[in-house]
Amino acid sequence: MKLHEYQSKALLAQHGVPIPASAGVVMDAAGARAAAAKLGGKVVLKAQVHTGGRGKAGGIRVAQDAEHAAQLAAEMIGMVLRTHQAPEGVRVERLLAEEPVDIAQEYYASVVPDRSSQRSVLILSAMGGMDIEAVAEEHPEAIARAQVDPAIGLRDYQLRQLCHEAAMPLAQRADLMRTLRALYETYASSDATMVEVNPLAVTSDGRLLATDAKISIDDNALYRHPELAEWTDASEEDPIEAEAHRKGIQYVRLGGHIGVLGNGAGLVMATLDAVARAGGKPANFLDIGGGARSEVVRESLALVLSDTNVRGVLFNIYGGITRGDEVARGILEATRSMDIRVPIVVRLAGTNAAEGAALLRGTSITPALTMADAAAEIVRRTAA
Ligand code: GDP
Ligand code: MN
């Protein structure tokens, strides 16, 4: 789950990370006018959407007084923000109203899990404010990292070393160490999968402030953080994924045009690869799990077909305890009750695969023998 900037900052502040003075979130011109008055006139209005690069796209504007704030808010709310990360555009519904800060220097700081070392990694760079991927590419030496063993926690010597490697000004190191520790505490205690502050700004009056923040929380740990789970913004979720989530179906939208369903996450992942190898683009990941109840198949298939990009569907079923003929019957029952206008290819293997294929013969569904055959067939049938 991704948090908005205003939520991320509230969470960081709870753990002692300094943030700019805030008048909270506003949703209209009147709210922006009141926020400006509260902050003493000048205010920065920041679009609350899950994409970076808002600054360049016009999603961050500074107002000189309350009237100006009202006017800018009226322009910004409802606008569709197009950034390099979100070229399709995101509608702006909320603005964060904050004290505009006079930025002298921009740093980058983040904490993310590092799968290869099975540790957390704290990342610090004096080259903040820009895309960190670009910094990593062009100036890899400007990025310092410290691995943190979650069982031991973050040690002061690691922070000192990190500040040294990132060549941070000596005068700022005590402040930086305090802030980086608070950043790590936020990450560890919230079960975050990412805490990123970019820029971590040094203001012209010498304050170190998190002027932007992005936090993602591990969905599997949300049950431990009901106060964070409440922050979910339905308008930012993919509507099909949200629907799948409500129904307890394991679905991930992938953007291609071939719907993929299978029983077992590993099998579905392998199927996505097979489709790609055959030259197709998978529209989704969907694991129908064990069993073959036609109701589950129907709901899953309906979900896949609700993506209007889908031009064909591939079922990849490995019969184990669930027999192939049961699955074939489930698919047939499900498809009979639906109005389906795209080709469906079903690959059945394992227990009673032949019986399953026999049931499908003579129907509109195309059986296939192997995963590669099935992928090639659906790619051929959906070629534009
Ligand atoms: P992002 O573009 O979506 O990552 O949004 P950021 O919050 O990181 O803002 C982008 C850039 O806008 C920052 O690097 C700053 O240069 C500038 N910016 C954002 N907030 C302020 C502010 O309060 N004052 C000033 N002077 N610049 C700001
Ligand atoms: Mn930023």
Image (cartoon, rainbow, N blue to C red):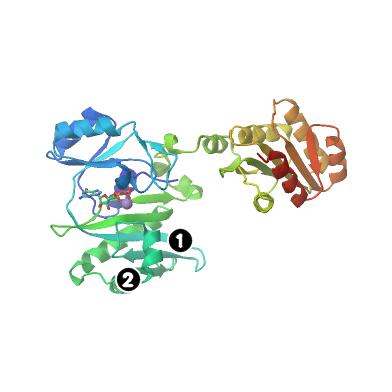
The crowding category of the residue bearing disc 1, from other C-alpha atoms within 10 Å (few below 14, some 14 to 19, many at least 20), is: some
Q: Residue at x 65, y 50 (%)?
A: 272
Q: Which mark is residue 162?
A: 2
Which is more toward the observer, 355 or 189?
355
For mark 1, give the secondary structure: strand
Left or right of residue 39, residue 195 in this image: right
| Callout 2 touching callout 1 (CB < 8 Å) | no
Q: Is mark 1 within 8 Å of ligand 2?
A: no
Q: CA distance from mark 2 to mark 1?
A: 17 Å
Residue 113 is tagged as 1
Image coordinates of residue 381 in percent, x first then y, are 72, 39
The kind of residue tagged 2 is Leu
Q: State the image coordinates of residue 84 (x, y, percent, origin top left).
A: 40, 47
Quadrant in which the N terminus is drawn = top left
Residue 171 vertical position relative to residue 293 in the rendered view, above or below: below
- Image coordinates of residue 141 in percent, x first then y, are 36, 72
The amino acid marked with disc number 1 is: Pro
